[in-house]
Image: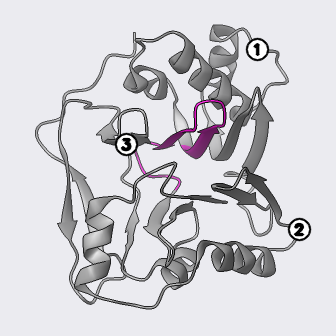
Amino acid sequence: MLGVFSSSIVSPPEELVAAGCRTPSPKITSAALLNRFEQTNASAVSVHVGDHVQLAYTHHKESPLLPRSFAVKDDIFCLFKGALDNLGSLRQQYGLAKSANEVILVIEAYKALRDRAPYPPSHVVGHLSGSFAFVVFDKSTSTLFVASDQYGKVTLYWGITADGYVAFADDAELLKGACGKSLASFPQGCFFSTTIGELRSFENPKNKITAVPATDEEIWGATFKVEGPAVLASTE
């Protein structure tokens, strides 16, 4: 799966910008990245949301245990990969039909976060149990919300393209060829929201997240780590 967002939606993370400047490396534009995704993935589906957002996904070579899915509801777009262990109880919590899958559940959880403010994002994501990574874009508010499970069972990566777009994908090689050293693994157990404007841990939301510059030999430009002792956020 692939989500690409212009700087009018999300500002490129300073840590990834700096990493790309330390070790200049070849990059391609966001349009070329999307084209590469479509050419290398059979039956790829892509969606342009206005002039600033491009989303794409495919079932090509996906794991049956970690399927990819895509949905749109009420102008909320969601790319999801993985499976939730507590999907049944979450359907009841959000009043959804038994046919509702993970991607619909995440959209409903995001809507609860958006419409019941103040409602901490860590509370919403902390309720999700299983293997997952997702990218949510709310067209009505131009809000981006991204998260990865606390154990890193579904890997997610983010980087910056040649034209300054921020890209998220579950394929490291795809972004490596597009973002050069302006690339990092999205930290497990964390979420990024343009409403907040920064990365946060949903298990330890008060702990600072820092970026450690990578060595020249590594494909990453930086590694994001949660500082301080672990203090689990309440999900009650």
Disc 2 element: loop
Residue 185 lies left or right of residue 48; in this view the side is left
The residue identified by callout 1 is 96
Residue lying farthest right? 43
Spatial CA distance of label 3 from label 1 is 26 Å
Residue 113 location in percent, x, y? Answer: 51, 19
Tell me which residue sits at (74%, 77%) in the image. 35
Q: Tag 2: residue type? A: Ser
Lower position in the chain sequence, tag 2 or tag 1: 2
Q: Quadrant of the C terminus?
A: top left
* 182 part of magenta stretch: no
Numbered tag placed on residue 220 in the rendering? none
Tell me which residue sits at (36%, 33%) in the image. 196
* 143 part of magenta stretch: yes
Label 3 Cα crowd, 10 Å radius (few <14 / some 14-19 / many 20+): many
The correct choice, above or below, for 149 with respect to 11 in the image is above
Label 2 Cα crowd, 10 Å radius (few <14 / some 14-19 / many 20+): few
The residue identified by callout 3 is 190
Image quadrant assignment for residue 180: bottom left
Spatial CA distance of label 3 from label 2 is 31 Å
Q: Which residues are magenta?
A: 132-154
Q: Tag 1: residue type? A: Leu
Lower position in the chain sequence, tag 3 or tag 1: 1
Tell me which residue sits at (58%, 70%) in the image. 171
The correct choice, above or below, for 153 with respect to 84 in the image is below
The correct choice, above or below, for 5 with respect to 134 in the image is below
Tell me which residue sits at (47%, 69%) in the image. 164
Image quadrant assignment for residue 87: top right
Numbered tag placed on residue 43 in the rendering? 2
